Image (cartoon, rainbow, N blue to C red):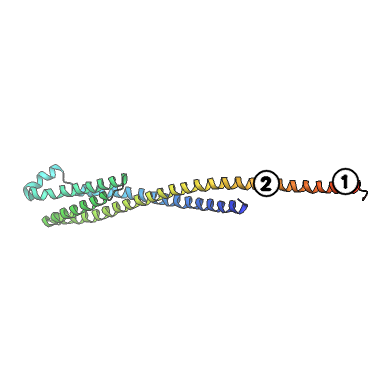
Amino acid sequence: MANSEEVSDIAGLLNGYSTGFVDISESIMILTDVRQSLLVSLENNLDDLGSLASIDLSEQMALLDTYGPKKLMHPQVLETEIAEVGNSLASYLRSPKPLYRLQMTEHSKEFNNGLALFNEAAQVDEERQRAAQLNTLFIDAFSMATRLMDLKDGLDECSASIQALQSGLDTVLQQQVQAQARLQMSLEKDAVHLADSRANRVTVALLVVGLLLVFGLG
């Protein structure tokens, strides 16, 4: 039978769920802020990478005779792989599948291979500096993209925890309603028993008085 202790225990569980909701909500806000900041930084980084890797048509024509078509292909490869890293990240953020992580790693390898070829073919300091800048920017971009994937996983875990808490809370709330109902019924039954007991005592007393009067014992 339910008692006040049972209701108190359920109240304790509810407080625990409330604390859980608050903690997870705070985690979600922190992760969301970090994600937004990283997205802005990565967008700027990728823009810089794209600008550094790209060679416009007029520049290509001017350099074609000097460096040849093979060397001019290296920046195009770099530009393609930079874009593919961004695409892999976008795909993961929409639907977090391990495949997209693998794809991003493969595009990173292709970028590094292309950058090595570009650096080997460099003939002036300006090209070597460009290669060094591309390397630094890409390392940062890949790190931020990986971090954003991890943040996506963290936010999804928080979402799953919220759903689990909600399910558990629904169960506890049902238990609380049922426990309070049983406690109320128990209190009402106790009140009825007390009233019946008092009525019985009064009845017995009246009978005793009546007997005393009948038999002249009073």
Residue labelled with disc 2: 189
Residue labelled with disc 1: 210
Q: Nearer the viewer, residue 30 or 191?
A: 191
Q: Nearer the viewer, residue 177 or 123?
A: 177
Q: Residues within 10 Å of mark 2 (few under 14, many from 20)?
A: few
- Residue found 46% across the figure and 53% down from its top: 23
Task: Name the secondary structure under disc 1.
Answer: helix
Residue 4 visible in the snapshot? yes
Calculate the distance from the C-alpha at mark 2 to the C-alpha at mark 1. 31 Å
- Residue found 22% across the figure and 47% down from its top: 84
Inspect the image, locate mark 1, and give the three-letter code of the amino acid beneath it. Answer: Gly
Task: Please name which of the two marks, 2 or 1, marks the residue nearer to the observer.
Answer: 1
Task: Name the secondary structure under disc 2.
Answer: helix
Task: Tally the marks.
Answer: 2
Image x and y of residue 173, in percent = 53, 46
Inspect the image, locate mark 2, and give the three-letter code of the amino acid beneath it. Answer: Lys
Residue 126 visible in the snapshot? no
Can you name the residue that lies furthest to the front here?
A: 215
Q: Nearer the viewer, residue 191 or 152?
A: 191
Q: Reading the chain from its start, which is encountered first: label 2 or label 1? A: 2
- Residue found 28% across the figure and 48% down from its top: 89
